[in-house]
Image: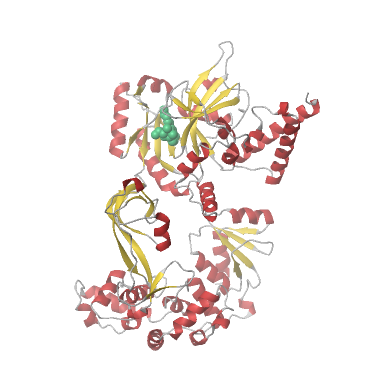
């Protein structure tokens, strides 16, 4: 027999924990620290362990998982779980909307409920008298698998519905998915342990729901959004609140939300079909900012009576369709591998692919990074591969389709000498990358060095693009960055496809670029691993260029952010003959002011520590950092009690939370801009 005091305490704990779960996972507004939540959960579990009869079906302790199963049982859906038809363009959407309109023979405007198409797995949740009693996968639509144990561990799914305004039996349908952040953390953890990880959040969600051990599923941080009702049953003697009669799909979802079922915040009720395309465009544009993966949008006739009139064809409703984004993953064939030589001599294998339309563009190349990546993929020439292009991210080869491998596949062999200049190639210890040793003797490195030298963040030479640099090198008009300044108008105008105006432009651009700043000049040299920030730090520390040229590794390491490797790169750069020659020429041709040390009163932010996080939209992070440092501030990468200010840009994440917890003062980007302006 359980003690009455414990029985009461269990009820209290249920209420408190359910309330906290709802605030945290559904409303996204945590109200107590995690430790407080853990304490309540531990108390509940300890009572339940001592008195098992107090462990109820809707106990929030189920969120941590229970006994492992031997296999999943089958569930026959009371109402079949349907699928959706797809459209892929505005024309196809118009055709769909016209079919709906025609079938309804009505002149009335049709409202649509607009929803993101969540990329996870459809599940059906059955609540009896408000308690979650069964969860099932879609399966073939008629019969699915019983995954109740795993679904109980999903934090945002209520084990008990809130309030009392629900039918005796309620089956809701929705999508279980893995948020991007949970997926990234899971894969990072897998990689650390030398395991393979999942190809995408959808597979990760599916793999987690298929765990026989719900304790594992509990650790996977799955989430859920409801998108429909499957089945409702109510004893005729009882009546429900008015909302249950709501004749709108959208309002029914809102009603489910009041019962504690999470509803996707992007769902919107559209006044008519003409608003569909802008919702689609909006969601497509927001896609990367959403915390979960989607693969399109879904539009549903909102009026339930009209839905019923329209009915179903085969396995899909006539009243809804998915308006999908262009596929982000496609299959194609690896035709060959070329080797490109970069600015620092790094030799990168580039996959030449049979052109394929993926993620909205035609892709015919993808980087294979290095030998390690080739080994990881186990890829051979002529293999069929899965290509992924998400957002504006460069296309990646995700995996090899081994089942399609034929006998004409061959290994990818790395060159034994530089494919451009034939110099020896080396692999530094601990590095995955093969490098050409030709330095500026190598045509490829020369081109890349000159492109970098004249690029926007370096000398920003007006009128000189990458193509023109290649042409100038190919036509032997320049060999080094210094040669750029020796170009005459005559040289340039003799080049193919070069009009007088473009020639003038380039010569003027070069004349202007001769005067620069010390940080930009250092950055422009293209020393390995010396980016804008390091260049600015070197300039601020040494104040003039001559001091940097002769500094030894020990001294260089005194500069903020410069470690042993970067210090070595710098000294090696200034020891190489061709660099010495080019640099001395440039010193004669170009000019920049030395850095003047600011006196203490010109360093108003001296001893103030800043941390920058999130995306800054008005200036780059490096620029903000350099400006703060110029005013004497320290800019650090991590928050601690010693931090004075956190500058939180867009999409600031864990650093912002940490700063709030530590009581660090938080500045917006506008605050920062105003602060910097004060001292200009
Ligand atoms: S409604 C009768 N709404 O897409 C209509 N499905 O391709 C049934 N999905 O199996 C589905 N987001 O797994 C609906 N907002 C959404 C959805 C959605 C994702 C999935 C669901 C379904 C599949 C059909």
To which quarter of the image does residue 216 belong? top right
Looking at the image, is 431 positioned above or below residue 551? above
Q: In this view, does 148 lie to the left or right of 497?
A: right
Nearest the camera: 19 or 409? 409
Q: In this view, does 36 lie to the left or right of 159?
A: right
Q: In which quarter of the image is ligand 1?
A: top left
User: Is residue 626 toward the left or the right of residue 98 in the image?
Assistant: right
* Of 483 and 255, the residue lying toward us: 483
The C terminus - image quarter: bottom right
Q: Where is residue 505 in the image (x, y as percent from the top left)?
A: 28, 75
Give whichever of 553, 494 is nearer the camera.
Answer: 553
Query: Is residue 536 visible to us here?
Result: no
Q: In which quarter of the image is residue 441?
A: bottom left
- Write the residue at 39% across / 22% down: 306
Q: Is residue 303 visible to us here?
A: yes
Q: Residue at x 75, y 29 (%)?
A: 51
Residue 593, compared with residue 115, is above or below; it is below
Tell me where residue 566 appears, x and y as whole percent. Answer: 51, 75
Which percent across, then down, holds residue 202?
46, 42
Image location (x, y in percent) of residue 476? 25, 80
Asked if 408 appears above or below 141 in the picture, the reply is below
Left or right? Give the position of 219 relative to 432.
Answer: right
- Seen from the viewer's position, the closer of residues 462 and 576 is 576
């Amino acid at each position: 027999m359980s003690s009455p005091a414990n029985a009461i305490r269990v009820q209290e704990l249920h209420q408190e924990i359910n309330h906290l779960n709802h605030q945290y996972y559904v409303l996204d507004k945590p109200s107590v620290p995690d430790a407080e939540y853990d304490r309540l959960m531990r108390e509940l579990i300890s009572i339940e362990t001592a008195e098992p009869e107090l462990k109820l079906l809707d106990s929030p302790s189920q969120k941590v998982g229970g006994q492992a199963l031997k296999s999943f049982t089958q569930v026959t859906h009371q109402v079949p779980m349907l699928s959706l038809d797809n459209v892929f363009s505005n024309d196809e959407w118009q055709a769909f909307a016209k079919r709906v309109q025609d079938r309804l023979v009505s002149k009335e405007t049709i409202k649509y409920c607009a929803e993101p198409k969540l990329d996870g797995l459809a599940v059906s949740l059955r609540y009896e008298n408000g308690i979650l009693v069964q969860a099932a996968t879609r399966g073939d639509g008629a019969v699915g698998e019983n995954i109740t144990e795993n679904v109980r561990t999903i934090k945002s799914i209520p084990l008990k519905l809130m309030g009392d305004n629900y039918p005796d039996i309620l089956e809701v349908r929705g999508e279980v998915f893995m948020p991007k952040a949970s997926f990234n953390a899971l894969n990072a953890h897998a990689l650390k342990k030398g395991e393979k990880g999942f190809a995408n959040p959808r597979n990760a969600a599916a793999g987690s729901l298929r765990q026989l051990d719900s304790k594992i599923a509990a650790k996977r941080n799955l989430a859920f959004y409801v998108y429909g009702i499957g089945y409702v049953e109510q004893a005729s003697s009882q009546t429900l609140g008015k909302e249950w009669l709501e004749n709108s799909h959208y309002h029914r979802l809102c009603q489910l939300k009041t019962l504690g079922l999470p509803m996707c915040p992007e769902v919107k009720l559209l006044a008519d079909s003409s608003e569909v395309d802008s919702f689609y465009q909006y969601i497509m544009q927001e896609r990367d900012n959403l915390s979960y993966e989607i693969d399109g949008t879904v539009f549903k006739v909102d009026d339930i009576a009209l839905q019923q009139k329209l009915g179903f064809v085969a396995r899909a409703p006539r009243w809804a369709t998915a308006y999908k984004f262009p596929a982000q993953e496609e299959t194609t064939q690896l035709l060959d591998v070329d080797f490109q030589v970069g600015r620092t001599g790094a030799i990168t294998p580039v996959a030449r692919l049979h052109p394929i339309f993926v993620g909205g563009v035609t892709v015919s190349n993808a980087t294979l990074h290095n030998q390690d990546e080739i080994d990881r993929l186990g890829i051979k020439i002529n293999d069929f591969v899965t290509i992924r292009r998400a957002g504006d991210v460069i296309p990646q080869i995700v995996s090899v389709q081994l089942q399609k491998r034929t006998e004409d596949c061959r290994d990818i062999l790395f060159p034994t000498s530089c494919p451009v200049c034939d110099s020896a190639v080396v692999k530094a210890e601990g590095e995955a990358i093969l490098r050409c040793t030709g330095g500026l003797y190598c045509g490829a490195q020369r081109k890349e060095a000159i492109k970098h030298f004249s690029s926007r963040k370096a000398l920003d030479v007006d009128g000189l693009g990458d193509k023109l640099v290649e042409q100038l090198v190919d036509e032997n008009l320049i060999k080094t960055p210094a040669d750029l300044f020796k170009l005459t108008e005559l040289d340039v105008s003799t080049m193919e496809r070069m009009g007088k105006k473009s020639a003038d432009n380039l010569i003027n651009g070069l004349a202007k670029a001769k005067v620069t700043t010390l940080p930009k000049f250092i950055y422009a040299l293209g020393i390995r691993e010396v980016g804008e920030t390091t260049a600015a730090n070197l300039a601020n520390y040494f104040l003039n260029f001559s001091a940097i040229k002769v500094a030894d590794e020990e001294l260089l390491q005194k500069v903020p952010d410069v470690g042993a490797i970067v210090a070595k790169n710098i000294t090696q750069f200034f020891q190489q003959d061709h660099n010495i020659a080019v640099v001395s020429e440039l010193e004669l041709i170009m000019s920049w002011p030395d850095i003047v040390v600011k006196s203490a009163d010109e360093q108003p932010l001296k001893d103030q520590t800043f941390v920058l996080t999130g995306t800054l939209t008005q200036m780059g992070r490096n620029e903000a950092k350099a400006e703060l440092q110029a005013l004497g501030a320290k800019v650090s990468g991590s928050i601690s009690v010693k931090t004075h200010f956190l500058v939180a840009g867009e999409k600031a994440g864990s650093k912002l939370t940490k700063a709030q917890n530590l009581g660090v003062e938080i500045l917006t980007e506008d605050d920062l801009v105003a602060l910097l302006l004060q001292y200009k």
